[in-house]
Image (tube, helix red, strand yellow):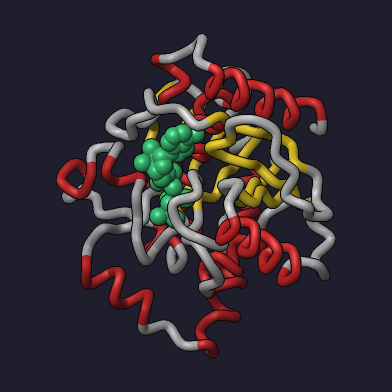
Amino acid sequence: MKAIGIHSFKGGAGKTFLALNLAYLLSSKKNVCLVDFDLRAPSLYAFFGGYERVKDKPRYLNHLIEDVENFESYLLPIKENLSVILASPNIEEIKRDLRKKEKDEMKVLERLMELKGKLRERFDYTIFDTSPGLSYRSINSMLISDILLFVARPERIDIEGLKRLEEVTSTLETPRYVILNRVNGDVDVGINLPVIAKIPCSCSISMDEPFFVKNNPEDPVTKSIEELARFFERIE
Ligand SMILES: Nc1ncnc2c1ncn2[C@@H]1O[C@H](COP(=O)(O)OP(=O)(O)OP(=O)(O)O)[C@@H](O)[C@H]1O
Ligand SMILES: [Mg+2]
């Protein structure tokens, strides 16, 4: 199992869009789990039934961290070979995560390592969609990832942020790659990490549907994410 952590220093870079569509494409051949690691501002619940659908079974990553033995019951099946683990949109749950102190974090990391063990038995890929910047949760997800993808738009604020991510992860042995999103034309971001995808900017993207690649198979955006999926297949 490969755990792919998707990060950006600044928000809105395209992490969730990429996580959803990469998960969809990889699941055509492999068993994939997509995890909403953004416990402060969750997204995936908005696509997959939302709070209403799972109200009678409120099983979110928030609880899973303390209940790893029952991991199977937290998996929400989306399609063949694709499951998600949602983060809770409940305000009280979000506040509970915010109240966690530095001393709680080692325990959280231990539990996340255990969770990774469970994911490893069940999936070929796990994709972590994280919160922007540096929070405990995004650092935790970096520490349990086997591959890190840094998403950035080719503009000054994002590129500066990319340098911060490069710096803060420089002591990790985890392979790190850059995905440039919303790119038109040639760009050189001047960073010492391999750029493995350049996803064009497209006005046809609407995140009202989770899987752009499913409905737009010929779009250049889909083609670039397909190429990225092949990159993962090559490095297996
Ligand atoms: N290649 C693209 N072309 C045009 N629009 C895009 C592209 N990629 C993403 N978007 C749009 O950019 C917006 C932000 O994307 P997304 O929510 O995936 O970012 P994010 O990094 O997850 O944000 P956050 O940090 O808030 O979690 C969305 O409205 C999405 O539809
Ligand atoms: Mg997001």
- Front one among 60 and 173: 173
How many labels, in total?
A: 0
The percent position of residue 234, horizontal first and vertical second, equals 80, 26
Position of 92 relative to 131 (above/below): below
The percent position of residue 203, horizontal first and vertical second, equals 39, 27
Determine whether, in the image, residue 159 is placed left or right of residue 39.
Answer: right
Determine whether, in the image, residue 134 is placed left or right of residue 214.
Answer: right
Determine whether, in the image, residue 154 is placed left or right of residue 202.
Answer: right
Residue 145 visible in the shown view: yes
The quadrant holding residue 77 is top left
Q: Residue furthest top?
A: 218
For the point 22% across and 62% down, which residue is it?
90
- Front one among 106 and 73: 106
Image quarter (top left, top right, bottom left or bottom right) of the C terminus: top right
The percent position of residue 194, horizontal first and vertical second, equals 80, 44
Determine whether, in the image, residue 95 is placed left or right of residue 225.
Answer: left
Position of 56 relative to 205 (above/below): below
Image quarter (top left, top right, bottom left or bottom right) of the N terminus: top right
For the point 28% across and 69% down, which residue is it?
93
For the point 22% across and 72% down, which residue is it?
92
Residue 84 visible in the shown view: no
Position of 166 relative to 43 (above/below): below
- Front one among 14 and 174: 14
For the point 65% across and 53% down, which residue is it?
117
The percent position of residue 183, horizontal first and vertical second, equals 58, 35
User: Ligand 1 is in which quadrant of the figure?
Assistant: top left
